[in-house]
Amino acid sequence: GACGNVEQSPGGETSAPETAQAQQLNIVPFPQSVTPAAGELTLSKELTVATDTNAPDSAAALLALLDQLDIQYSENDNAVINLKLDPSLPLGEEGYRLNIDQNITLTAPTDAGLFYGIQSLKQLLPAAAQAEYVLPKVLIEDQPQYNWRGSMLDVARNFIGVEYLKQHIQRMASFKLNKLHLHLTDDQGWRLEIKSRPKLTEVGGTTSVSGNRGGFYTQAQMRELVAFAARHQIEIIPEIDLPGHTQAAIAAYNDLACDDVVDNPPQNQCEDVVGPARLAPYSGTCVGFSALCSSKKPDVVYTFVEDVLREVADIFPSEYLHIGGDEVLNEEADAFPDFITKVDQIVASLDRKLLAWEEASAGDIRGNSLLQFWNDDYDIAPALEKGIHLVLSPCSYTYLDHGNYDGQPDTYTWCAKQGIPLERVYSLTPESYQQVVGVEAPMWSEKVADDATADNRNWPRLAAIAEVSWTKQPQRNYEAFTQRLSALRQHLDKMGIEYYRAPELSWD
Ligand code: TNX
């Protein structure tokens, strides 16, 4: 049939699944190995569970799932559903083994692995309560191909509230995505409270593109969000975009700009930011006009950067700090490489590794840095020679501010004239790049002014990003993916996702 995902048995002949259900396991991203067995397991609405006290996040996820399905449970050692840490399983940091037989045995080396096993189990069950639940007997052994499976939200151009971020984290987790990159600052807004520089949010927190949603997060809100995300096995990667994309900071602290900035000749690209506008809040959509004046005011600028990044590092425990580094197209362009080199040293002094957009390869950055590759034709080879690894965000596959279809209103087309349909996202082959840690899909928000639009741009395309970054190539098949994802519609509805109804998913 159309389901090409069931593994061949070692003998070479196709293993014969007993039921249609066993053949079509509607799991996204598809697991590495699926071995169907004969028969089914029926779960009643009252059962026993055994969780592992050393794995609290997966235990919480299981109990939430049972609650959602109206299943009563009691703890028992020899239970119907067993979760157990087993450090000896060779499944990496995020893998799991889910055996559905006379009962359900889920084992994994880590809490994260068990958590992902629960996500798979959840997709095998209906989204809403029923009288009983019938599962196919199957052995699933699974682990991701890449450990960077990311979504980026641009909360700077248009603010996105904490409630949406929490929903987004839950939705990401259900598709085993594990990095949430927050683009916290840009020309049109500064969204993170910085206690040593209060005007950043007093001034920069109020603005946005076209006067749409403004706002900012307090440090307390972000600390809580970091903990919430961690319970969903998601790391939040904060980005402070430097030295360009900084008009919101410059409008708050004019001293960060070069003293002669208002006298500089008009930027031929950004006619709406000339003269006094170069020190004022900005709500247009031009890029590349702003920069901190590191060439002439190193003391002011590096003290600012250090103060900001120290507070950021204190809030976000992530291994990497994203320092932006994209699109400095103004008079500070010559100072850019040296700026990046110095900021990497600041990041090192905070005991963190550097992550930046690909242009930061111009600086002398440490070999353990990551670069986010976004222009399909950027010459990244010199960075690779230094040992640097890549987060893949090639714009013609992953830029979710581009349309779901050709001509979709309120979308960009600069990187892909016909938009980026689901199939195009799915066709990204990370295996064809070198030194890759994974994939991330940015949703820039110049044209995304509300939650419903954010949902429409992110979903279902983030499900394709999840499968491209989790599932190995021989297991990936677009036709099978669309069938599995189609079948998960109620699960997306249950999460309240206002997804784009991609025609190939028959969700009309
Ligand atoms: C390029 S990609 C940008 C963003 C814009 C985006 C719009 C990158 C590093 N910079 O500033 O929002 O295009 O698609």
Image: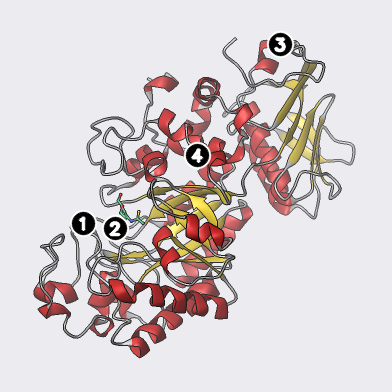
| Visible residue check, residue 70 | no
Say if mark 1 contacts mark 2, CB within 8 Å: yes
| Quadrant for the N terminus in the image | top right
Residue 217 image offset from top left, x and y in percent: 40, 66
Residue 301 image offset from top left, x and y in percent: 35, 83
Kindly report the distance in space between the C-alpha atoms of the residues bearing marks 3 and 2: 50 Å
Say if mark 1 contacts mark 4, CB within 8 Å: no
Crowd band around label 3 with a 10 angstrom C-alpha radius: few (<14), some (14–19), many (20+): some
The residue under label 4 is 465
Say if mark 3 contacts mark 2, CB within 8 Å: no
Among numbered discs 1 and 3, the one appearing first in the sequence: 3
Residue 220 image offset from top left, x and y in percent: 49, 70
Kindly report the distance in space between the C-alpha atoms of the residues bearing marks 2 and 4: 23 Å
The residue under label 1 is 285
Among numbered discs 1 and 2, the one appearing first in the sequence: 2
Residue 19, which numbered label?
A: 3
Residue 415 image offset from top left, x and y in percent: 30, 43
Given residues 361 and 6, the one toward you in this image is 361
Q: Nearer the viewer, mark 1 or mark 3?
A: 1
